[in-house]
Image (cartoon, rainbow, N blue to C red):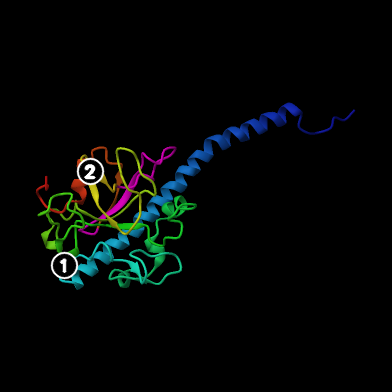
Amino acid sequence: MRRKCGFTLIELLVVIAIIALLMGILLPALGRARDQARTIGCRSNLKQYGIGLRMYLDDNQYNFPDAHTWLRSESHNYVRKGEEPDGVFWQYLEDLDVHMCPKFAMLAKGTNWEDTAVSYVMNSYVGRGGEIWSSWLGADVTGVAKETEVYNASRVAVFMEENTWTIEGYSDYPFNDTHFTVGNWSRQIDNYATFHNAPGDLDKGGCNLVFVDGHAEFLPRVKDLEDGFRIAWPKKDLPY
């Protein structure tokens, strides 16, 4: 008698188990690959920011733009989706896709910042004629107005990212405007994003940023808040 061809129940269960095992191995790897692609896409945006910054500085006697109004709409000091972008930096990067980090766009869904069109922020210690928005560093402390006043152009950041949430002991404010004021151990204020390359814990990753000399790089979460302040502070000596 000729035997019928086919899989037995045991064989089918073995195949299903193997497929489930492979999926369990591959899915986390695919998730990490997607996250890495978003991180790279974001860094590519900031590389274009570096080029735009170079053109802006060359066109404006090496003066930095105002950290509060560098990119805005007619009604806000930031740009919401559907609004017409304005601000001195817009003419150098007239493409809204460049101004939105793909990972930020994903994390912003369902938050107060879901409608924002710009996810990057500017270091408030540069520009504005050297005037600092807050006196927390001391009444007579100033930043810098010009590129030529920056002590180390390759290690002072101009544009960076923030989280849409706060982290206890790390940051007092989430992403809420277009300027960035990093603090230190005595007053945290803003701090760098932690959502890139952070599988399983968005508080432990890092951010992308672009420096005065125009290069962009990935910054792992700063463990020492003093180090974080040093990256944003444009002068040789600390003000405290």
Q: Nearer the viewer, residue 240 or 1?
A: 240
Left or right: where 126 falls relative to 108 = left
What residue is shown at x 24% (from left), y 69% (from top)? Answer: 55
Residue 141 visible, this angle? yes
Q: Nearer the viewer, residue 47 or 71?
A: 71
Q: Is 79 drawn above or below residue 151 in the view shown?
A: below
Marks 2 and 1: in contact by CB < 8 Å?
no
Left or right: where 131 falls relative to 93 = left
Q: Secondary structure at mark 1?
A: loop
Q: Secondary structure at mark 2?
A: strand
Left or right: where 12 falls relative to 78 = right
The N terminus lies in which quarter of the figure? Answer: top right
Query: Which region shows up in magenta?
Result: 192-214
Q: Which of pointers 1 and 2 indicates the residue nearer the eye?
A: 2
- Image quadrant assignment for residue 120: bottom left
Q: Nearer the viewer, residue 197 or 203?
A: 203
Q: Is residue 73 magenta?
A: no
Question: Which residue position holds label 2?
Answer: 187
Indicate the amino acid at tag 2.
Arg
| Residue 202 placement (x, y as % from top left) | 40, 41
Question: Which residue position holds label 1?
Answer: 62
Indicate the amino acid at tag 1.
Tyr
Please tell me whether the stretch drawn in magenta is mainly helix, strand or loop. loop
| Residue 14 placement (x, y as % from top left) | 67, 29
Q: CA distance from mark 1 to mark 2?
A: 31 Å
What residue is shown at x 18% (from left), y 72% (from top)? Answer: 60
Q: Which mark is residue 21?
A: none
In the image as oriented, which residue stretches furthest toward the right? 1
